[in-house]
Structures are given as structure tokens and as C-alpha cells.
Amino acid sequence: MKQLGIGLAGLGNVGAGVYKHLAQNRVLLRERLGVDFVVKKVAVRDLSKQRDVVVPAELLTNDPLAVIADPSVEVVVELMGGIETAFAFVMAAIAAGKIVVTGNKALLAERGKEIFAAAEAKKVPIFYEAAVAGGIPIIKAVREAFVGNHILSMHGIINGTSNYILTRMSEAGLQFPEALAEAQALGYAEADPTLDVNGWDAAHKAIILASLAYGFWVDSRQIFVEGVQKITAADITFARELGYAIKLLGVIKAGIGERVDVRVQPTLIPKGHVLASVNGVFNAIAVRGDLVGDTLFYGRGAGQDPTTSSVISDLAEAALALQAPRNFFGFTAHTIYGRLMPISEVVTSFYLRLQVEDRPGVLGQVASIFGEHEIGISSVIQPETHDGDTIPLVLMIHLATEGKMRRALAEVEALDCVKAPAALLHVETFS
Amino acid sequence: MKQLGIGLAGLGNVGAGVYKHLAQNRVLLRERLGVDFVVKKVAVRDLSKQRDVVVPAELLTNDPLAVIADPSVEVVVELMGGIETAFAFVMAAIAAGKIVVTGNKALLAERGKEIFAAAEAKKVPIFYEAAVAGGIPIIKAVREAFVGNHILSMHGIINGTSNYILTRMSEAGLQFPEALAEAQALGYAEADPTLDVNGWDAAHKAIILASLAYGFWVDSRQIFVEGVQKITAADITFARELGYAIKLLGVIKAGIGERVDVRVQPTLIPKGHVLASVNGVFNAIAVRGDLVGDTLFYGRGAGQDPTTSSVISDLAEAALALQAPRNFFGFTAHTIYGRLMPISEVVTSFYLRLQVEDRPGVLGQVASIFGEHEIGISSVIQPETHDGDTIPLVLMIHLATEGKMRRALAEVEALDCVKAPAALLHVETFS
């Protein structure tokens, strides 16, 4: 039987899962693929570290380049994390003609353009199903299954930590710090949860999804990204009263002409939409194609086993690519799209929560400003109960450009009667 | 640029969609795949028929074998429907060494074993994404993305007509005949809806999904299949009171040892489960793998455009297979599983609705019989209001084998106090 020689770089949570499950499901893989998957070399940072997974000492090295240099290694699996070291490793693997499998979303989002150019030049395939949404085969779906579709939009709940936090805030009325602490206690959030809660983990995935759908790499410095840190239990309650759930949403949408709208923000979603019932650490991506219509892909977006499932799927692709050399290396640029739509020109509906003085005339002042900017208000919540001299004032705003809305909001925030900074969220109606 | 020569057999709803959209999305396909998809020959039954899609007369033939014989045709797309003619056509295509794309679920479910054996012998790939769940890439997901997983179970809402009917019965309180008439008026049900409402369309798809997950072809004559015809508005209301929705569910489950449980029945699903909110003509398949955990794939399960999306995806696979010959031809038998579990040994929970005489002692008589069979009753609904001398009596039954349940039910139905035939449905808890 054919062998596939595998080199692992990184033996953290996912690396250990890949090592373990390649052994456990080896018979199944042999039967299904006619290929024997054998790990030949494993690079770790610290050779002396005790691990749950037992790897024979002769396979271990603390030099990632030794994995690439091993002649029996045909595919390298990059699971080191980080950007700079991983970039150097992946570029070295490509230069050496080794197929690359990676689950590193930050690496691809920040350096994908260079990596895929090098892969194309050396004719070395790169596979990265594990980089977006854990075990959900969204890369395969968009790239292969929907190859005949113009992708009209993707809306993704693609950060499990944030979704867990928002779910618990909604279910148990927790505030953000309590829900985050709970997520950390359960292992759903890292000790340093920055990239999860500030939206950047989701943004990296959104950039990768946009690259697949629209054939170009969006510059991460240019996209609009907001995390869940500023969401309050009150926002979730107001949203519910209005018929919405709040989800951290990655939005990727074909805009006008060649322009593409890519952004990440906590967003109000109508309760009836399937995405609104995606709870806890689960991820889901709604994809709308011109032929296929509305679809949804749902599953675990992180964790050792689901991510391992995607890495093994990529290894199977690698085995196929080795047996049948092909002219596809992991990324297809095309000329139909090619430019990010500036956030200021994005048209959306809004949820706006202001903290205002509790006296007559305030709503009139606020509404007048929006009126002057020709921005329509579709509904207003002004709760009866309150404490202190100020009360929340919640407005639902009709479609407007983000730029126009921000200009009007700056004037509103300058009013004497408006106190704390406003909370401004997008509302997605999927129309 | 490379060309892919395509022959279409059948120019009905889906065939016309494929012809039209290959032209409309031609530039996109060229850019993404580097291949120009060109239809070379189209077989139709009636050359004189007026059609929405305009096909040049020189491409048309009324002889399907002329499509296979055309030397410029590298891939044939079988969209004729039916079993016998389609079987002869597909076998002829394989014999001629032409790659086959088909959306014919009945053909594969009934004759898949022979077809794939012939394909394997001739080393001709067969692709059939369009055969299950329209635009949802479930074949690709199970076969490729989850290749590293033991598939523990699949639960699918895989007949859009039945799901539309059940949704309307639930939303609008319609009875089955009214909901069916509405579905027909809207084009969601065929003039002859037999295969949709009797469960067999779903059963064909379940057989195909089982073949992918478990590597053998289940004999269609041996599986348990029930449709939605006997569901009443009352059943839907009782189920709702108990916290469930009723869906026509295809169940494919790894059983004990090499045995696999494959069946189709209207089934009670807990309201909180994602499948319970799949409404209207939409399809969804929940797949549970040993690594990936719980996933769900959702989308349009039928219709010209979604099905075309899957056919084009298969054509892209065909183009790749022509460029890079591979050792995979569409089906992988394996030895881990291999036998259908008899329905009598399937363990499940049940919903049972009896029509009984309205007098004291009836519940006692019924409950005694279940007690003698050691079958546990978890809850009972006996509505206060009624007309006539009989009333409905609804029981929720704990886990029992279908065989034991049927034996007990036969005794219950023989009681003088039990009148009309009982309604017995499975309850799926996804535990």
C-alpha cells in the first residue's frame, strides 16, 4: 500500500490530536483512501515537555527545518501558530517542494498573498481547511462545491469564544466580564482572549473566506473590525425586545462592481433566521450563491478533534495531489472582483443605544439631527424604569451608509443631553 | 485554454438549468478552473418540443447513445430520470470510458452496486452530488471532508415536498390533503407526488448516504420506509404540546458491530434541535462524526438552480479527473460495516396515538399491556374535549425495540376499547 509521509510542526492541542487520531483511525483511512498515513517527524519547541500523547523519541526534533529536510516527509503540517516563525517555515517547505497543510488563520490572512504566490511558482499545493471554522468544511464547500456560483454573500459566526460569551449573556443575563470568566474557566477562551473578543480572530477567517469567494486578498489594515467587549446585557435585552439576537458576525458580500464588503461586528440578526439559533461554542456560516441560493454550514469551530478532522481531510487531498499532480495549488486569483469597499460606503441598518438625560425634548433633539441627515428611524425604545438622571434611548435606524450614520452620530453625541458614548451596531436583515 | 466536452442526456428542468448556467457563469468557471466548459451534444426525448432554453439544433439529438458516441464528449451528464433507461445509458457511457455525472438518486439507490462495480473495472469516475439534497454538498462533505471520521450518524430532512407539507400543516393547521394540494399549486410537489409523500424519494437518498458512510449498498427492499401521508394535524399539535416538531427523517446510524440502521419515517424531533427549525422546502442533514462531532448542512434540496450548482461542481471534478487521472472512481467499499440492522431490532422512543372509547379503565387496560411487555410510558395526553364516543389517547414511550413495540401494539389494537388503527412514530432525541 502507498504511504504518505507526514511531518508535523507543532504538538500543541491540535498537533497532538492529529498525531493521536491518525493512529486511531488508521485502518479506516487505509480502507477509504488506499493510503497509509505515517508521521515521520514531529517538531516541538521543548523536547523535555511531558505530553498526553506519546511520540517515539526518534521522531521528535526541536528544529522545524529538520521536518522539511527529512526526505521521507512529503507533506508538512504547520500547527505552530504565530505569524513570523510560521511564515518562514511554510516558505521553506514550499521552497523544498513539500506540500503544506496549515490551520494558521492569522498567517494566511496576513501573508496569504506571498505564500500562495510562492506555492504557485513552485507548483506546491497548500491546504488549509482547519484555518476556518474548525471541523466545518467551509473551504471545500466554497472552493469546490460552489465553484459554479457567484458568491453573493457569506455571513459567519466564526469565533466560538465570542459566541459562547454572547450566548451566556443572553441566556443568563451575564455581563461581558462574567461571561468571559466563565468561558475561560471552561476552556472556551484562552488565558489571553484578546484576539477572540476583539474580533480579529474572526477577521482573519473573514479575510480567508473573502479570498476564496472573490479571488483577491483583502488588506487586513483596511477592514472594519469590532469585537464583543463593549456589548452589554442591556443591549442583548433591547435587541430581544425588538426581535433580534446579537451575534459577532463576519460579513463578506459582493458590492457594486468589483468592490467587496468585508467586516466583522456584533450584529443584530432577526430571531427567525437560522444563524440566530447558533448558540454556545458552535460556528456557522451562511453562504448565498447565485445558483445554490441560501445554504448554511454548522459545527464546532474549534477544539482538538474537530480541527483534526479538517487536517486529516487536507492530508487526504495531499495524498491525492501526490498521486495525481494537478494544476491547482490552493488559490485562484480572478479578475471579476478586486477592491475592498470602504466601510464608510457600506449601507446597512443600525441599532443605536444612547445614554441621555431624563427630560422632555431629548428624543426630539436626537431625532431632528437624524432628520437633517435624511436618516430614517424605524423604532424607538425608551424604558420606563431607570436609575439616576440618565436613561437609555434605543433607536433602530433604516438603511444608511456607515459614513453618513457616523457623521450624524458625531452631532448627536455632541448634544448636552447625550452622556456616555453611544453603542452603534449593525442590523443584518439578509434581504 | 483546455476545453471540457460535455454531453447532456435530458433537457428537463435540471438539464435546462445546467445548459443555461454553464453559459451564464462561463467566464467565472474559466477564471476559477482554467477550463472552458462546452456542451457538445444534448439528447432529448422530443426534438420538436418548445423549450425555455434555446439549444442550437445541431447539438440536439433524440438518441442518448449519440451523446456517448460523440468523440468530443468527455463527460456525460445523465438527467433523464427513471431507472431502466438511465441504467442502460450510464452503463453504456462507462463502457465507452466517458466520465459520468448523474443526479439520479433512484438509479444509484437501486443499481449503484452494479454501476460502481462497472466504473471501478473500467476506471471511469462517477460523480453524483446532485443526487442527494440538491445544492447541499453533502456527498463531498461526507466522502472528502469527513474522510478521517467514523460516521456515527446522519439524520436528514431530505425531501423538500414532505417538509413543505409538514411545515404548512404545523403553521396553518392544514390537513395532509390540503397541504399537498397547496404544494402542488406552488410547484413544490409533482403532479404525481407518490415517491415524495410515501418516503421513497428520501429512502433513495438515505441509501446513497449510507453507502458513503458505511461502504456498502443497503438493499432497498429491506429498509423500513414510511411517508407523511398518514400524519394528521392532530399529531402535529400533540407533538408540539410535548415539545417536538414532526419531520420526515432519514436516519443512518452505525449500529452494533458491523450493522447499520437505515430507515425513513416521520419522526418527532425536540424543538430545540437545529433540525426542528428547518422549514418549508429546505433540506438539512445533521452529520455526527467521531472527530468532527455534530455538524449540519442546510440548503435547497431541489429546484433547477441549486441542483445545477451541484452538477457544475461535479463537472469541475470531472475536469480535474481528466487532467490528473486518479485511483478513485466514486465509491469505496470497506469492510468495517456491511449489514443492515433489521427494523425489529432498532431501539428508539415512540409517539403513539390511539383512538379509544371514552370510558374509565381504558388507560389502565392499555398501560397494563405495555407493562407486561416491560415497555415504559413516559407521558400521556388525553384531551378533555372530544366529539363522539371515542377520544384520542397519546402516549410517549421510552426506548424499546421496534419489534417489541409492534408486538405490544398488536395486543393493544386488539382491545375492544381501541378503535381506529394507531399512529406510531419514532422519537429522535439525538443522544
Image: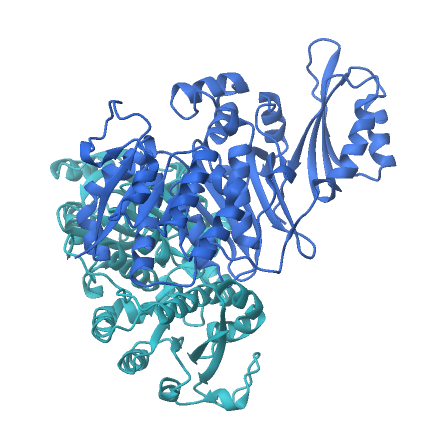
Chain colours: A blue, B cyan
Left or right: where B347 falls relative to A412: left
| Residue A17 lies in quadrant | top left
The answer to whether one can see residue B300 in this image is no
| Residue B325 lies in quadrant | bottom left
The answer to whether one can see residue A6 in this image is yes
User: Foreground residue, A154 or B379?
Assistant: A154
User: Foreground residue, B120 or B263?
Assistant: B120
| Residue B396 lies in quadrant | top left
Count of numbered tags: 0
Give the vertical position of B196 relative to B6 (above or below): above
Q: Position of residue B112 (x, y in %)?
A: 25, 69
Image quadrant occupied by the C terminus of chain B: top left
Q: Position of residue B257 (x, y in %)?
A: 12, 47
Residue at the far top in the pictured view: A388
Q: Position of residue A138 (x, y in %)?
A: 44, 48
Name the residue at 44% across, 58% down.
Answer: A144
Name the residue at 87% across, 35% down.
Answer: A372
Name the residue at 38% across, 57% down.
Answer: B158
Left or right: where A78 falls relative to B302: left
Left or right: where B255 falls relative to A361: left
Name the residue at 76% across, 16% down.
Answer: A419
Q: Position of residue B369 (x, y in %)?
A: 15, 39
Give the vertical position of A330 relative to A57 (above or below): below
